[in-house]
Image (spheres, rainbow, N blue to C red):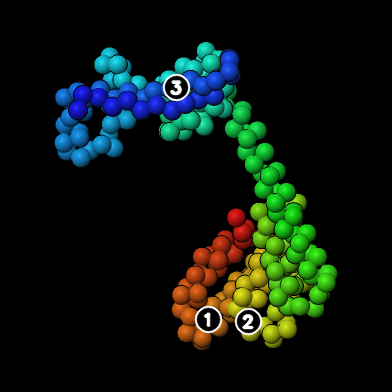
Amino acid sequence: LRGVVAQTLCKRQDSEGRIAAFEVLVVTTSVSALIREAKTHMLPSVIQTGRNYGMQTFADELTRFASKGIISPEEAYIKAVDKSEIETKFSLAGISLDFKKKAAEEARQRGLRRAQDILEQIKQAYEQNPKSPETQMTYAWVLATSPYEEIRNGKLALKLAEQASRAFRDKEPEYLVTLAAAHAEEGAFKRAVEMVRRASDIYMQRGDAVKAASLGSRITLYEKGNAYRDE
């Protein structure tokens, strides 16, 4: 083995078509030793320090392409294998990472639209059968635990969760967990912990130690004063 060359194709911004970015590893004495000793995790560091031998990482070439305007910084970032490395090289080259904020916001908006569509479906099902405990619980869960502030409504979630749990005399653990989430969303964390502990006890009484144990992290979350988010 004399060397390894890997490539990735990038969309050009200076013209039509694509351009190949290469990562190059030259097998030196130190590289051979690392391979022989199964320390391949150290090879990226060797490549970064082996420019005199003609070595380069993807981040090296991608940063160079972005600096020259051949490809966009966003394209370079997407194609980079080691995001941390290319962020460092971008910083040294004076290349802005603002596109990351834009991409994150666009992704958030897409997720929000999907969540709103799902909420609308649940809301319609609830309006068709408002006395159904299952529908009440599903609706309450989304309103209490959605990662999107635009969707959450703790007050309504608590009302629905109380109605749903009351239908089973507060003896169904799944409903108690939803009720706990609604309490937490409203800031009543002690009450939330109480509900989860009660749900855990019921699971234990039913011989389901696994589900009971799985609620431990939820109790810790509420004890720290944090609401649950169904990411």
Q: Residue at x 28, y 31 (%)?
A: 43
Amino acid at dot 1: Tyr
**Res. 6 image quadrant:** top left
Tell me the mark number nearer the camera, choosing from 3 and 1: 3
Relative to residue 6, is residue 181 depicted above or below?
below
Q: Extreme right residue here?
A: 127
Answer with left or right where residue 117 lies relative to residue 194.
right
- The image shows residue 220 at horizontal and vertical percentages of 53, 65
Q: Quarter of the image holding residue 170? A: bottom right
Q: Locate the C terminus and report the quarter of the image it occupies.
A: bottom right
Q: Secondary structure at mark 3?
A: strand
Give the Cα separation between the discs numbered 1 and 2: 9 Å
Q: The N terminus lies in which quarter of the figure?
A: top left
How many marks on residues?
Answer: 3
Is 36 positioned to the left or the right of 195 in the image?
A: left
Q: Position of residue 80 (x, y in %)?
A: 46, 30
Q: Is residue 150 left or right of residue 26?
A: right
Task: Name the N-terminal-most of marks 3 and 1.
Answer: 3
Q: CA distance from mark 3 to mark 1?
A: 57 Å
Q: Residue at x 39, y 23 (%)?
A: 22
Residue 162 higher or lower than 146, as above or below: below
Asked whether the residues under the numbered discs 3 and 2 touch, taking CB atoms below 8 Å apart as contact, a structural biologist would say no
Q: Which mark is residue 172?
A: 2
Residue where numbered disc 1 is placed: 203
Q: Earlier in the sequence, mark 1 or mark 2?
A: 2
| Residue most extreme to the front | 17
Q: Work out whether residue 88 can be spotted.
A: no
Instruction: Read off the residue under disc 3.
Output: 20
Q: Earlier in the sequence, mark 3 or mark 2?
A: 3
For mark 2, does the 10 Å Cα neighbourhood hold few (<14), some (14 to 19), or many (20 or more) residues? some
The residue depicted at 56 percent of the width and 27 percent of the height is 74
